[in-house]
Image (spheres, rainbow, N blue to C red):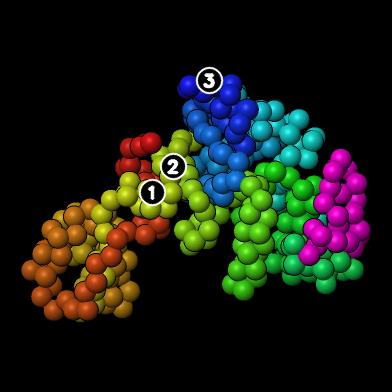
Amino acid sequence: MEKTQGQVAAGAAVHLIGLHKRYGDVRAVDGVDLTIAPGEIVALLGPNGAGKSTTVDMILGLTTPDQGDVTVFGSTPEKAVAHGAIGAMLQGGSLLDDATVGEMVTVVASLHRKPMPVADALRRAGIEDLAGRRPNKLSGGQRQRVRFVVALVSDPDLLVLDEPTAAMDVGTRREFWKSMYEYTASGRTVLFATHYLEEAEEFADRVILMRAGRIVADGSVAEVRALAGGRTIRAVVPGATEPVIAALPAVTGLDLRDGRVAVSSSDSDVTLRALLTRCPGAHDIEITSIGLEGAFLSLTSDENVSVR
């Protein structure tokens, strides 16, 4: 039997229908429909001004949509937050610099009905050794981990993370995502916005691309790559100039550094033939499928038409 809209909303971690939000003449969110199932790890990507932050704010109940509906586990965002179903790690979130990390997490835990034991939250975030320190004495990456434990201690079913690994070094970012996997293994849901496309490519079950307030792609990393189409040609091209490479047929993007060229192409055969004709000295040629970064640039460019 086909599910009704209400049944879908009740069973979804996040359910958005016809979401709109304007700020003056700017359409920050322009008709977003989205359903996220429990247990998914979803990356929300898009250039600055795409509508990601506004969409996240409406999911958290921080902003009221002009039009449309938002439900989180079948409830309004406000009720979901009150019940501790949502934990949010916002990049600009303030920390209590006059309290130790342990004291601050204990205070936050006391605000929730069924919090995670503070010691468990600190362990999951990998910062047990920071419990006795004050946030103003921590590095940028350590402060991010503290924001994470503040979001985690309510033991939420949905974690919303805004640029979660900003200011973290490579090793710390690895440890962070390891803890994410452990947390979601029990069916928890994660929605994260990031500018690190390699993180989305490696860790997300699903990628959502936004542009100009609309969703332009939604699927697995492989599916989003396929939507963009094309391949990347890499070669050493002595004497190459950007105008010459850009003029090749079917080129959708390029990067030229010290004679090494990476060209995104919607028809790699046509582009490669033209390249070898115009630059016969080209060598060390490689052709690969377009990566998530190439798909991001292609699908969020101003010339691109929305696809679903």
Q: Look at 66% across and 59% down and name the residue there.
A: 182
Q: Read off the residue under disc 1.
A: 224
x, y percent for residue 119: 85, 61
Q: Look at 44% across and 42% down and name the residue there.
A: 218
Q: Read off the residue under disc 3.
A: 4
x, y percent for residue 75: 69, 28
In primary-sequence order, the first of circles 2 and 3 is 3
Residue range (magenta): 99-123
Mark 2, residues whose alpha carbon is within 10 Å: few (<14), some, or many (≥20)?
many
Numbered disc 3: secondary structure: loop
Mark 3, residues whose alpha carbon is within 10 Å: few (<14), some, or many (≥20)?
few
Q: Read off the residue under disc 2.
A: 218
In primary-sequence order, the first of circles 1 and 3 is 3
Is 227 magenta? The answer is no
x, y percent for residue 27: 51, 31
Instruction: Residue type at mark 3: give it.
Output: Thr
